[in-house]
């Protein structure tokens, strides 16, 4: 499975101009000039939520989904595994059948070799080599077809996970919903919540309705 992950960082900066305030202060009398700079700056800036401890900073809520669990536990994931296994077994039977046929032909040629001329042996050798190459090509195409089938099912399942996760994230007020990663650091201002179980249940409910 090939999947993409995005890390989103938001930085907010607020700048309050002080030039006009400084010019106005310079034109005032000695009393204003002696007023402590700290108190002037404090009285001039807008009130912030951080000034009042009763207004705690709002945490950023992000959610993550474990795709491995979805693949193993969801009804869709289990069904896809059954389909892949059935297709793999069917293709393996085809390969084994052609392999046995090739071995039978090899034994038949080896039994005739003593009675053949050098030219005939070389011709039989080239003929058999061509069949071996055809078998190898068939086996490679079979493997490629199976991989394409797996990728198609994986894309289908990821599209469903993406859809359900987006709807869940919007309804629960999450800022980001991402695929589970090895998080090296999470700030105390961030709530990282595993929503795999909820996504799994929603997907299973959708399968039952079908």
Image (spheres, grey):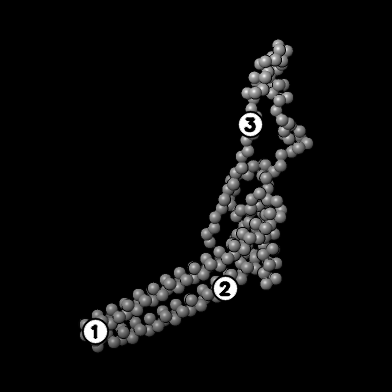
Kindly report which numbered mark, 2 or 1, lies closer to the viewer in this rendering: 2
Q: Residue at x 68, y 54 (%)?
A: 170
In terms of secondary structure, where does tag 2 sit? helix
Query: Alpha-carbon neighbours of circle 1 within 10 Å: few (<14), some, or many (≥20)?
Result: few
Q: CA distance from mark 2 to mark 1?
A: 47 Å
Q: Which residue is mark 1?
A: 120
Query: Alpha-carbon neighbours of circle 3 within 10 Å: few (<14), some, or many (≥20)?
Result: few
Q: Which residue is mark 2?
A: 83
Kindly report which numbered mark, 3 or 1, lies closer to the viewer in this rendering: 3
Q: Residue at x 67, y 64 (%)?
A: 203
Which numbered disc, 2 or 3, marks the residue that appears first in the sequence?
Answer: 3
Q: CA distance from mark 2 to mark 3?
A: 59 Å
- What is the number of the mark on residue 15? 3
Query: Alpha-carbon neighbours of circle 2 within 10 Å: few (<14), some, or many (≥20)?
Result: some
Which numbered disc, 2 or 1, marks the residue that appears first in the sequence?
Answer: 2
The reply to whether residue 69 is visible in this rendering is: no
Residue 53 position, x and y percent, is 76, 34
């Amino acid at each position: 499975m090939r999947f993409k992950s995005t890390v989103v960082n938001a930085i907010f900066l607020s700048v309050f101009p002080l030039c006009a305030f400084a010019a106005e202060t310079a034109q005032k009398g000695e009393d204003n000039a002696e007023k402590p700079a700290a108190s002037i700056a404090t009285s001039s800036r807008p009130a912030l939520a951080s000034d009042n401890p009763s207004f705690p900073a709002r945490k950023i809520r992000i959610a993550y989904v474990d795709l491995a669990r979805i693949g193993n536990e969801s009804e869709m994931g289990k069904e896809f595994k059954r389909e892949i296994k059935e297709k793999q077994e069917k293709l393996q039977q085809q390969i084994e059948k052609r392999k046995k046929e090739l071995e039978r032909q090899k034994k038949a040629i080896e039994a005739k070799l003593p009675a053949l001329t050098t030219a005939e042996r070389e011709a039989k050798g080239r003929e058999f080599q061509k069949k071996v190459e055809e078998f190898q090509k068939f086996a490679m195409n079979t493997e490629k077809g199976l991989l394409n089938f797996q990728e198609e099912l994986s894309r289908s399942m990821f599209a469903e996970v993406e859809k359900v996760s987006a709807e869940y994230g919007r309804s629960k007020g999450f800022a980001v919903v991402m695929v589970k990663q090895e998080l090296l650091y999470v700030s105390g201002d961030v709530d990282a919540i595993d929503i795999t179980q909820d996504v799994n249940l929603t997907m299973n409910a959708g399968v039952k309705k079908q």
